[in-house]
């Protein structure tokens, strides 16, 4: 499978149809999905028919632990829908077993470097619910800075959505300045 990025402990590779079972398990963990859909289960057919094709078609990368070969979750790095090509959105979703072990930060830092070094990004940004402290910490560790609060129109509001969303960003000039230090 084509490798997109390797870090010290991670391989990020392109998704394929055989990843459906791993995605099904990840997307059906209520704790993993808490800030995304309130922890509601996702039917397997939705994963097979919608999620896998979307992930295979670009911007999403399976995160595999280099030592064990185990599926940890995924990252994405892609322009936002209808957004400028040089502004890339960073995202991640990892199994609970990977939480608190630095994998989200490690993968995100690798993708941020790739965005600026190879992909011509002007800006990398990430978004999460304001109450998702864990994800916000990862963004801050990666050098992203708070940019704004906004509201997302949730079709079915979930716990914490009343506090809105936050966006963090890192601009090329700031990334370059940090690299010179």
Image (cartoon, rainbow, N blue to C red):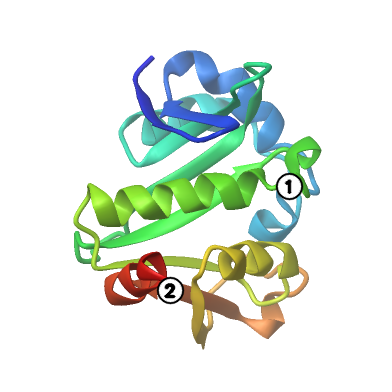
Q: Which mark is residue 169?
A: 2
Closest to the observer, 167 or 25: 167
103 vs 173, left or right, is right
Q: Is residue 145 above or below residue 156?
A: below
Residue 84 lies in quadrant: bottom left
In what element is the residue under mark 2?
Answer: strand
Closest to the observer, 71 or 9: 9
Q: Which mark is residue 112?
A: none
The image quadrant where one finds the N terminus is: top left
Res. 17 in view: yes
Q: x%, y% of residue 61?
A: 44, 34
Q: x%, y% of residue 94?
A: 66, 41
Residue 141 lies in quadrant: bottom right
97 vs 49, left or right, is right
Q: Residue at x 41, y 34 (%)?
A: 55
Marks 2/1: CA–CA distance: 23 Å
Q: x%, y% of residue 170?
A: 40, 72
The image quadrant where one finds the C terminus is: bottom left
Res. 152 in view: no
The tally of labels here is: 2
Q: x%, y% of residue 83?
A: 24, 66
Furthest residue to the front? 181
Q: Residues within 10 Å of mark 1 (few under 14, many from 20)?
A: some
Q: Which residue is mark 1?
A: 32
Closest to the observer, 116 or 89: 116
Which dot, 2 or 1, sits closer to the camera? Answer: 2
Q: Residue at x 69, y 60 (%)?
A: 35
Q: Residue at x 78, y 41 (%)?
A: 96
Q: Earlier in the sequence, mark 2 or mark 1?
A: 1
128 vs 55, left or right, is right
Q: Residue at x 60, y 29 (%)?
A: 23
């Amino acid at each position: 499978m084509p490798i997109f990025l390797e870090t010290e402990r991670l391989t990020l590779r392109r998704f394929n149809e055989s990843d459906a079972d791993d995605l099904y398990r990840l997307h059906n963990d209520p704790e993993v999905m808490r800030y995304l859909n309130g922890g509601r289960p996702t039917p397997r057919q939705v994963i097979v028919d919608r999620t896998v094709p979307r992930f295979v078609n670009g911007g999403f990368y399976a995160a595999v632990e280099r030592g064990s070969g185990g599926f940890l979750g995924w990252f994405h790095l892609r322009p936002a829908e209808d957004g400028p090509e040089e502004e890339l959105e960073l995202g991640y979703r990892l199994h609970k077993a990977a939480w608190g072990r630095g994998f989200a930060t490690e993968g995100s830092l690798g993708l941020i470097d790739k965005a600026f070094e190879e992909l011509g990004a002007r800006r990398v940004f990430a978004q999460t619910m304001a109450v998702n402290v864990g994800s916000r910490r990862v963004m801050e560790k990666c050098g992203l800075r708070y940019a704004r609060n906004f509201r997302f129109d949730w079709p079915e509001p979930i716990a914490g959505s009343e506090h809105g969303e936050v966006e963090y960003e890192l601009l090329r000039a700031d990334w370059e300045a940090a690299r010179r230090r």
